[in-house]
Amino acid sequence: MSVIDLNSDLGEGYGAWAMGDDTAMLALVTSANVACGFHAGDPAGILRTLKAAATRGVAVGAHVSYPDRVGFGRRDMDVASDELVADVVYQIGALQALARAAGTRVGYVKPHGALYNRIAADMRQGRDVVAGIRAADPSLTLMALAGSPLVDLARGQGLAVVTEAFADRAYTREGALVSRREAGAVLHDPRLVAARMLRLAREGVIEAIDGTMVRIEAQSICVHGDSPGAVEIARELRRTLEAEGVVLRSFLAGEGAPA
């Protein structure tokens, strides 16, 4: 029996500015990566998303980012180590307080955007993010790109790690994400996305942008909440996986977290 987690980036609205459909996505995913205010999200909106996640029994993770609201956290930054560690601790702590108020808890950390991509290969910033997580709460799980050097680095520092693949992103033959600046980097066809992820769940492989097959060991699948048609993609993905006998369940299930 195949078991996999389905996650999405939520809580990314800001004031009167809406981003994605958190209500619809929370009915489909098993884990929610909730913005912490550095790339998106305001306190009241984040709290609403956390309350909705608690009601749905969806596990919650801190979606930590570079301090980059204007660029939505997708601009690379060369941040000093002491600043990056403090930024990670700050964001986790803020989300933990809001989560307690919402009747849930933060169970994992998933870096966002440019930070996520940078630390997949940049071991200095990777160590800083790991240090920030350990300083804030060493019981938290790190969600990281499957196959990246960060996975072994974090595990070597004593963190639990869950690896993920991206449903709506194209891959290179090396197993890296195709840059959003390149054509075909983001996938929009729900049936194509669902078929790719079904094969990943069953066989552990995904077709790269050049047609080669790449082996990826992923325990979670991400659908970007801000992508056009995100809800339709997540709905078709869930329908397809469940119809084919794949069990959707948070990787935190059984650890005292919402399942």
Image (cartoon, rainbow, N blue to C red):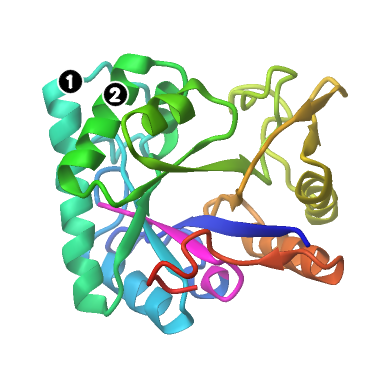
- Residue 59 in picture, x, y percent from top left: 43, 67
Compared across the picture, whether 226 is left or right of 46 comes to: right
Residue range in magenta is: 25-36
For image coordinates 75% across by 58% down, the residue present is: 2
The residue closer to the viewer here, 190 or 108, is 108
Please tell me which residue lies in front, 232 or 6. 6
Name the quadrant containing residue 103: bottom left
Residue 81 numbered mark, or none = 1
Q: Nearer the viewer, mark 2 or mark 1?
A: 2
Relative vertical location of residue 209 with respect to residue 133 in this rendering, above or below? above
Amino acid identity at mark 1: Ser
Is residue 27 magenta-colored? Answer: yes
Viewed as shown, does residue 68 lie left or right of 34?
left
- The label number, if any, that marks residue 127 in the structure image: 2
Callout 2, which amino acid?
A: Arg
The quadrant holding residue 73 is top left
